[in-house]
Amino acid sequence: MKKILLSGLFALAMLGQLSAPSFAGGHTPGVDYVVGDKKFSAHMEKAASAAKGTVFIIHDWDGLNDYEKSRAKMLSDLGYDAIAIDLFGVAAKLESRDDYRRETGALYKDRAAFRARITAALEAGMASGANTENIVIIGYCFGGAAVLEAARAGIQADGFVSFHGGLGTPDGQDYKNTTAPVLLLHGSADPVSGMQDLAALLNQLKEANIPHDAEVFGGARHSFTVPGSRDYDEQADKKSWDALQRFLARLG
């Protein structure tokens, strides 16, 4: 069984507790857990037959919603158990950009809490009956930055994939403890993390001897995978999803 390892993980027992999976209407199972005094609920989509592995999905800055749930369904259709995790908590107010900035900003300022929430979600998902042999963590925008936080934290997985994520590395952090290959899927016109940020990250991964790949989609801006957003790019969306599938296939 794959284990989630994080420096100081013993503190997690004090921060959070796991609960058994819950079932909405007897259909899609949810995964409920607690970190500190906050309640969280992830969304699970089980593969119809024996799963090839489990893909954890970390949401954008507006929290876990139908977008991530739809991606989980797409992954379950491909034969993977898929769990869209929650980093903000079920009671979080998420009605405006100010709310999104409040929630993401709090985690960016408290990296220990950031990592503890990621770890608690992964542990809860793995305790819920998901396949534990092949674990891949993916994320979109803020979720892409969270994936890289998980990679730097030394969380054990079989792969990390960032879709148009924030690529900057906080002061004092590096990739020396990263445990698995990293795939970066990014638009060349992304105004949030530009090509200089991508180049810097690739150099960091190379210096840390971490297997890595990047696919850059010409002209694609931020949020190019999100239908309905002003940056949506159907071609880049399809190409990046194909790249994820190739990455998953290489892992077995």
Image (tube, rainbow, N blue to C red):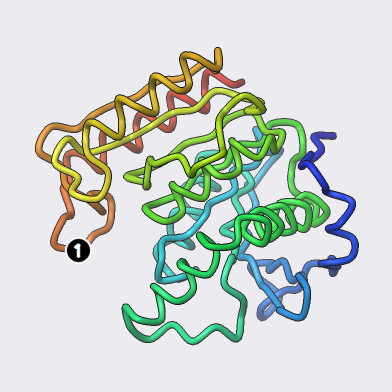
> At 72% across and 33% down in the image, what residue appears?
156
Residue 50 x/y as whole percent: 71, 38
Q: Is residue 128 above or below residue 181?
A: below
The residue depicted at 78 percent of the width and 41 percent of the height is 7
Say few, some or many: other residues with alpha carbon within 10 Å of mark 1 (under 14 / 14 to 19 / 20 or more).
few
Give the left or right position of residue 247, taking residue 10 as reference: left
Can you say whether 234 is above or below 90 in the image?
above
For label 1, the residue is: 229
Determine whether, in the image, residue 178 is placed left or right of residue 156.
left
Percent position (x, y) of residue 158?
64, 28
- As shown in the figure, which amino acid type bears the numbered disc 1? Ser
Residue 135 in picture, x, y percent from top left:
66, 36
Q: Is residue 20 visible?
A: no
- Residue at 59% x, 50% y: name it: 82
The foreground one among 44 and 114 is 114
| Camera-side residue of 140 and 114 | 114
Query: Residue 234, image x and y in percent?
Result: 17, 46
Q: Which of the image's four quarters has the C terminus?
A: top right
**237 sits left or right of 218 in the view:** right
Picture layout, residue 37 above or below residue 110: below
Classify mark 1: helix, strand or loop.
loop
Residue 40 quadrant: bottom right
Q: Is residue 140 left or right of residue 226?
A: right
